[in-house]
Amino acid sequence: MAGPLILAFDTSAAHCAAALVSGDTVLVARAEEMGRGQAERLMPMIEELLAETGHGWRDLDALGVGIGPGNFTGIRISVAAARGLALALGIPAVGVSGFEAADPDRAAPFWAVIPGPRGTVYAQRRGGAPTDPEILPDTALASLDAPVLRLDAVPADRLAVHIARVTATRWQDAPTRPAPLYLRPADAAPARDTGPAILP
């Protein structure tokens, strides 16, 4: 095998995407557009990818997971799955933000932009030393000081591949457990009986 076998997946937007990558070789990548149902679809999709390539769970060296920002529920689905699989398989799981996954090979400065709610975007200046992520009105995009790459212009299966490639540069560095990247509070009010929190 040309390199570590990395499974990456993302449900941070209206899709369920996964990729299996070994070194520079994309063995398989798949994405399905869906507004809901990612929790039910993610694990069967991953098992289909493994079966299609003749691999099993124990062949995996590391996991990569998209941590957002994006859809709150979708992010929690993927992060929880990555943590559970990493614990069960005894392999590292690496959290990769949408900003990092936008274009891992691009060295020149650019703004990675992720659509947000109510006329806003999540943005981070990449290339060189990245800035802190921020929330901007979408009207501010025209005045940014570098080209803009919108994450919704990147096909979801390619996004999963990019997450795997970023993971390949980190998985041996004893990464911390992945955690959701939230840049704003949830829109919904918390329920009286709140569910379990994702531990740090």
Image: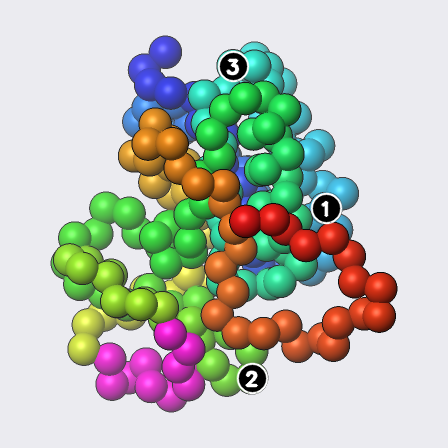
Which residue is more in the foreground, 17 or 94? 94
Visible residue check, residue 69:
yes
Instruction: Give residue 173's quadrant in the image.
Output: top left
Residue identifier under label 2: 118
Mark 1 or mark 3, which has the lower sequence index?
1
Look at label 3 and name its amino acid.
Asp
Label 1 packing within 10 angstroms: few (<14), some (14-19), many (20+): some
What secondary structure is found at the residue carrying circle 2? loop
Instruction: Give residue 142's quadrant in the image.
Output: bottom left
Q: CA distance from mark 2 to mark 3?
A: 43 Å
Tell me if label 2 and label 1 are in contact, CB under 8 Å. Answer: no
Label 3 packing within 10 angstroms: few (<14), some (14-19), many (20+): few
What secondary structure is found at the residue carrying circle 3? helix
Q: Is residue 171 left or right of residue 35?
A: left
Residue 7: mark: none
Residue 58 percent location from the top left of the image: 56, 14
At a point 39% along the width and 81% down the height, the residue shown is 136
Mark 2 or mark 1, which has the lower sequence index?
1
Residue identifier under label 3: 59
Q: Which residues are magenta?
A: 134-144
Look at label 1 and name its amino acid.
Ala
Quarter of the picture holding the N terminus: top left
Residue 39: mark: 1
The image shows residue 167, relative to residue 76, as above or below, that is above
Residue 189 percent location from the top left of the image: 74, 77
User: Is residue 14 located in the magenta-colored stretch of the structure?
Assistant: no
Mark 2 or mark 3, which has the lower sequence index?
3
Tell me if label 2 and label 3 are in contact, CB under 8 Å. Answer: no
Look at label 2 and name its amino acid.
Arg
At a point 34% along the width and 53% down the height, the residue shown is 100
